[in-house]
Amino acid sequence: MISNTIDMLKNELPLEQEALILSGDVKTGLVLVDLVNGFCTVGAGNLAPTQPDKQISDMVDESVRLARVFCDKRWPVFAFLDSHHPDIPEPPYPPHCIIGTDESKLVPELQFLEIESNVTLRQKDCIDGVLGSIEKDGSNVFMDWVKTKQIKNILVVGICTDICVLDFVSSTLSARNRGFLTPLEDVFVYSCGCATYDLPHHVARSIKGALAHPQELMHHIGLYMAKGRGAKVVSEVSVGALC
């Protein structure tokens, strides 16, 4: 019954996806959104999966693959790490990814990024990475990264498709449209490199204040909304032969 409903909704909200071939001819930056233990590693925290999750593990695998490609070629990488102060809540979510805990650290497969010279790591304490990049002096670490590196395309992977990924993509596109991110042209969202969490209705109704969050449907909606904001959603990412 649930799968039939999801299929029906997908038919009503069709999502055409493209293929992206990476080329050294176009300056592309890879943005990883919140690939931290607190969202990806089984049992790691309040918002981590409680059991192995194929969508999340596939997302991690694809993100690692792309991160290694970008590091091998010394292409720019920007990684957001969800990191919160213990005394500053983020409603409606329970405490998660507290600064200094294993929850706020990159998943083990991506910890090699910490020593790569082409990688910029940014701790953020809010859903939207663009807002989370604002410094006390008003500068913005993410925007400065785009402009300094002269990035024309951004390829986005991470979690959650319909929350942190979508908010980041939407803000980035709005900033691009206002001319704040020159020379940025396109934002690509890799569907297989994104994932979200699963909270079925029968579980949600037993948790006070919780909203049901069917994983497959919300992943689709997140991608659909990103495309509606102007992103290009891709189902395949490969590297050109001449790169």
Image (spheres, rainbow, N blue to C red):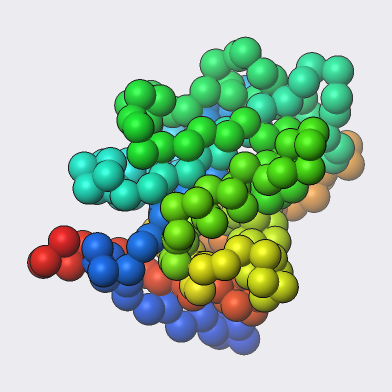
Depicted 198 relative to depicted 9: above or below: above
Residue 242 figure quarter = bottom left
Q: Tell me what residue is drawn at x 69 percent, y 20 percent.
A: 98
Left/right placement of residue 54 relative to residue 81 reads left
- Which sits in the foreground, 37 or 14? 37
- Which sits in the foreground, 149 or 9? 149
Q: Is residue 146 visible?
A: yes
Quadrant that contains the N terminus: bottom right
Coordinates of residue 226 in the picture (x, y in percent): 61, 70
Q: Tell me what residue is drawn at x 41 percent, y 45 percent.
A: 77
Coordinates of residue 241 in the picture (x, y in percent): 11, 66
Q: Tell me what residue is drawn at x 55 percent, y 16 percent.
A: 102
Left/right placement of residue 137 relative to residue 9 reads right
Depicted 230 relative to depicted 81: above or below: below
Quadrant that contains the C terminus: bottom left
Coordinates of residue 198 in the picture (x, y in percent): 60, 47
